[in-house]
Image (spheres, rainbow, N blue to C red):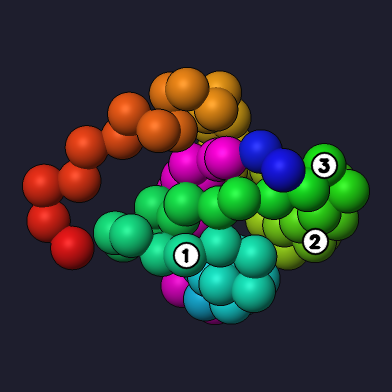
């Protein structure tokens, strides 16, 4: 299992809602357009495939930041 921060910028409301629903099945929303996830490598592949099938690659962006185990343990949360 690996830890990720996933952020997105989706230009269309309909696509944004679809992306949000997909991500919510794999990750925890922490702010608008920001999710945290602990994923198995196979789940990462599956999630990226689902997101890619919805997003418009010319106008939208989705970024996966993978956190190493020691980095994930050092995350400071200042609000819930």
Q: Is residue 50 left or right of residue 4?
A: right
Q: Earlier in the sequence, mark 2 or mark 3?
A: 3
Q: Give the residue at the far left of this rendering.
A: 78
**Looking at the figure, which quarter contains the C terminus?**
bottom left
Q: Which residue is mark 3?
A: 41
Q: Which residue is mark 1?
A: 28
- Badge 3: how crowded within 10 Å, few (<14), some, or many (20+)? few
Q: Is residue 65 above or below residue 11?
A: above
Question: Gap in Å between the C-alphas at discs 1 and 3?
Answer: 17 Å
Taking depth in this image into account, of 27 and 48 the one nearest to the observer is 27
Q: Position of residue 42 (x, y in %)?
A: 88, 48
Q: Position of residue 29 (x, y in %)?
A: 41, 64
**Label drawn at residue 13:** none
* Discs 1, 2 touching: Cβ within 8 Å: no
Q: Position of residue 27 (x, y in %)?
A: 56, 62
- Badge 2: how crowded within 10 Å, few (<14), some, or many (20+)? some
- Residue at 61% across, 50% down: 38
Quarter-of-image position of residue 15: bottom right
- Residue at 81% across, 54% down: 43
Q: Which residue is mark 2?
A: 50
The boundaries of the magenta stretch are: 3-15
Q: Is residue 4 above or below residue 42?
A: above
């Amino acid at each position: 299992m690996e830890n990720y921060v996933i952020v997105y910028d989706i230009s269309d409301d309909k696509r944004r809602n679809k992306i949000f629903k997909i991500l919510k099945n794999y990750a925890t929303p922490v702010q608008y357009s920001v999710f945290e996830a602990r994923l198995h490598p196979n789940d990462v592949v599956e999630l990226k495939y689902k997101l890619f099938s919805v997003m418009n690659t010319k106008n939208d962006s989705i970024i996966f930041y993978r956190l190493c185990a020691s980095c994930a343990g050092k995350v400071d949360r200042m609000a819930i």
